[in-house]
């Protein structure tokens, strides 16, 4: 039986993620844990995240889980980042006056700002970006299996990922301007949206994760 570890550092909707993973078909066991040994022994690992980057990175470092995440990334085992978990995979975030992140991807996390507008009609857009939005799959990837192009996923965030180059961009979305919805590199895949809040499409993404071998 495959084991999927959901990293518990007190900063994610952990049980919603775990329940969604448990709901998808497959011979797998889901554990929510902060134990380094359990995480490093798991076949697949999920890094969720909700809240301020300063608090997220602070807790990861306090629990020494920042090192554990990097070990998982280097091990070749499938690693999935969700929402702030995705943002934490960049080098740094502008949130909270600037926060050093995990550096699994080159690039930064930037704010939408206070004057975000619809490019078509100039209408003011609310921040945080909250609700359903179409995701354009910008690269073929096993994590997109059986998910139609331009499928809607559910977003809740005030900051967005800006990779240093286009190579890792696996999905994009438009809210005021185009920005990155998903990134991928080797055994790592990460999404800005919440699969566990994204109905059948989100469950399909989790189903893809529990069978993905970590190869692009």
Image: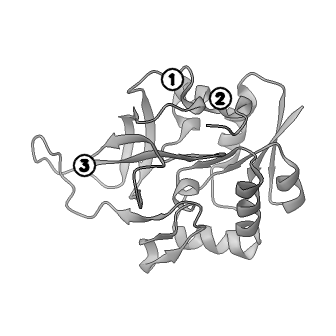
Q: Quadrant of the N terminus?
A: top right
Q: Indicate the secondary structure of the residue bearing disc 2.
A: helix
Question: In this picture, is 54 found above or below 175?
Answer: below
Residue 34's x, y, as percent? 80, 60
Q: Residue beneath label 1, please?
A: 147
- Residue at 78% x, 23% y is 26
Q: Earlier in the sequence, mark 3 or mark 1?
A: 1
Question: In this picture, is 74 found above or below 212?
Answer: below
Whether label 2 touches label 3, CB < 8 Å: no
Q: Quadrant of the C terminus?
A: top right
Q: Earlier in the sequence, mark 2 or mark 1?
A: 1
What is the distance, in whole Å, between disc 2 and disc 3 at their CAs? Answer: 29 Å
Q: Indicate the secondary structure of the residue bearing disc 3.
A: loop
What is the distance, in whole Å, between disc 2 and disc 1 at their CAs? Answer: 10 Å
Q: Indicate the secondary structure of the residue bearing disc 1.
A: loop
Q: Residue beneath label 2, please?
A: 208
Residue 16's x, y, as percent? 66, 41
Left or right for 107, reference 187: left
Q: Residue beneath label 3, please?
A: 177
In the picture as drawn, the residue positioned furthest to the left comes out as: 121
Residue 51's x, y, as percent? 53, 61
Question: In this picture, is 90 found above or below 32?
Answer: below
């Amino acid at each position: 039986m495959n084991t999927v570890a959901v990293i518990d550092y007190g900063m994610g909707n952990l049980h919603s993620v775990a329940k969604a993973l448990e709901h998808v078909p497959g011979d797998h066991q889901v554990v929510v844990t902060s134990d380094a040994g359990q995480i490093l022994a798991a076949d697949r690992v999920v890094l969720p995240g909700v809240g301020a980057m300063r608090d997220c990175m602070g807790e990861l470092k306090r629990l020494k889980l920042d090192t554990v995440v990097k070990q998982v990334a280097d091990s070749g085992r499938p690693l999935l980042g969700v929402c702030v978990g995705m943002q934490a995979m960049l080098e740094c975030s502008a949130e909270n006056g600037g926060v050093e992140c995990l550096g699994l991807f080159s690039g930064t996390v930037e704010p939408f700002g206070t004057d975000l507008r619809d490019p078509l009609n100039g209408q003011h857009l609310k921040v945080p970006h909250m609700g359903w939005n179409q995701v354009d799959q910008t690269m073929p990837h096993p994590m997109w299996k059986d998910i139609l192009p331009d499928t809607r996923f559910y977003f809740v965030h005030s900051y967005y990922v800006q990779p240093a180059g286009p190579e890792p961009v696996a999905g994009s979305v438009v809210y005021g301007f185009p920005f990155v919805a998903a990134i991928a590199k080797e055994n790592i895949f990460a999404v800005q949206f919440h699969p566990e809040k994204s109905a059948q499409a989100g469950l399909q993404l989790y189903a893809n994760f529990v069978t993905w071998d970590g190869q692009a």
